Image (tube, rainbow, N blue to C red):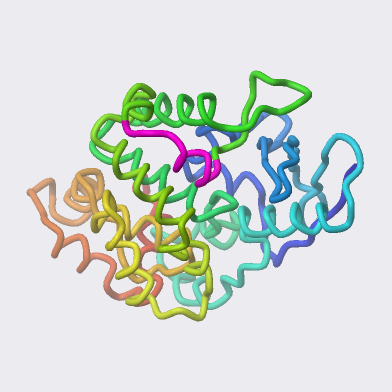
């Protein structure tokens, strides 16, 4: 079964997928030669299938094996629309940065959307697994989590969907440490349990009408989520008024504006302050090689 989902222009699937490392993390996969994003996904009723997504005209084509009921297709469409931000209007951002040399490539390359997971739960877990570790370590931890606790794809049981909060809540810290999560194991376990027990309405934070300060406070209350992780998650949720500042950000700002002299958080913030509510996105898309 294959269907088309429209996108707000300008739109480029590679420009959504490539800038964010999520495409390298299970259960995502990106075939650059074919321009196809694939993902093993578990639907709410328990069915596990592979989503194959490619650019198709003004939007994307989504293909799955077999037939889907109307409700299942509706769920798939909602998930893909969220993952790729197909309905995102960036016209105000494009108008603001149009004359900036460091951002001149943005509109013509249809940049600005950021690949995200279907659930905020998955994005929070993956973000926690990026802290204090090399990217190769994040890849290993996510692979172990997905293969060890995710539901298998019936047509290819070696591939798995991302584990549900319920599945992770039913395990224990020792099992998660065995998957290589280290000190992050109790954070992931507590997150899964609070979501499963209804103590944390995580998916409700997707509401674009919520004030940024409120969403940030809710994110920072999650164990394992600090300032950098919260800023990264805010970006995925469409709140761009915080810059995710880490050592890389400080290094790049130092090279760009301070002749290599050491800089701190204040200097990074100041470099993008003029972009106001869009400053996190301006930082994300800045042409550092320019």
Residue 8 location, quadrant: bottom right
Above or below — where is 161 with respect to 95?
Answer: above
Q: Is residue 172 magenta?
A: yes
In the image: residue 69, left or right of residue 150? right
Which of the pair 54/166 is nearer the observer? 166
Q: Residue at x 13, y 54 (%)?
A: 258
Magenta residues span 164-173
Above or below — where is 111 with respect to 18?
Answer: below
Q: Position of residue 131 (x, y in %)?
A: 28, 41
Which of the pair 31/222 is nearer the observer? 222
In the image: residue 255, left or right of residue 116? left
Q: Residue at x 33, y 60 (%)?
A: 231
Q: Residue furthest left?
A: 261
Is the stretch drawn in magenta largely helix, strand or loop? helix
Q: Residue at x 67, y 54 (%)?
A: 79
Q: Is residue 95 magenta?
A: no
In the image: residue 238, left or right of residue 186? right
Residue 187 location, quadrant: top left
């Amino acid at each position: 079964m294959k269907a088309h989902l429209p996108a707000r222009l300008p739109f480029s699937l590679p420009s959504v997928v490539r800038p964010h490392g999520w495409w390298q993390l299970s259960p995502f996969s990106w075939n650059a030669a074919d321009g196809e994003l694939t993902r093993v996904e578990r639907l709410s009723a328990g069915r596990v299938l592979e989503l194959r997504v490619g650019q198709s005209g003004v939007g994307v084509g989504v293909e799955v094996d077999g037939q889907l009921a109307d409700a299942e297709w509706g769920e798939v469409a909602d998930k893909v629309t969220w993952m790729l931000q197909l309905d995102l209007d960036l016209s105000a951002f494009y108008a603001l940065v149009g004359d900036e040399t460091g951002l001149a490539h943005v509109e013509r390359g249809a940049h600005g959307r950021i690949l995200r997971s279907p659930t905020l739960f998955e994005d929070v877990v993956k973000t926690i697994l990026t802290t204090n570790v090399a990217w190769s370590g994040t890849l290993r931890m996510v692979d172990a989590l997905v293969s060890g606790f995710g539901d298998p794809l019936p047509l290819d049981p070696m591939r798995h969907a991302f584990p549900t909060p319920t599945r992770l809540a039913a395990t224990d810290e020792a099992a998660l440490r065995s998957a290589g999560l280290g000190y992050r194991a109790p954070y992931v376990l507590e997150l899964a349990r609070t979501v499963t027990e209804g103590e944390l309405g995580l998916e409700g934070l997707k509401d674009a009408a919520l004030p940024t300060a409120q969403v940030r406070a809710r994110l920072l209350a999650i164990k394992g989520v600090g300032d950098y992780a919260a800023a990264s998650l805010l970006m995925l949720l469409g709140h761009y008024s915080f810059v995710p500042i880490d050592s890389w950000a400080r290094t790049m700002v130092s090279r760009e504006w301070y002749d290599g002299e050491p800089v701190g958080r204040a200097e990074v913030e100041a470099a993008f302050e003029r972009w106001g509510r869009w400053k996190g996105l301006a930082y994300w898309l800045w042409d550092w090689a320019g």
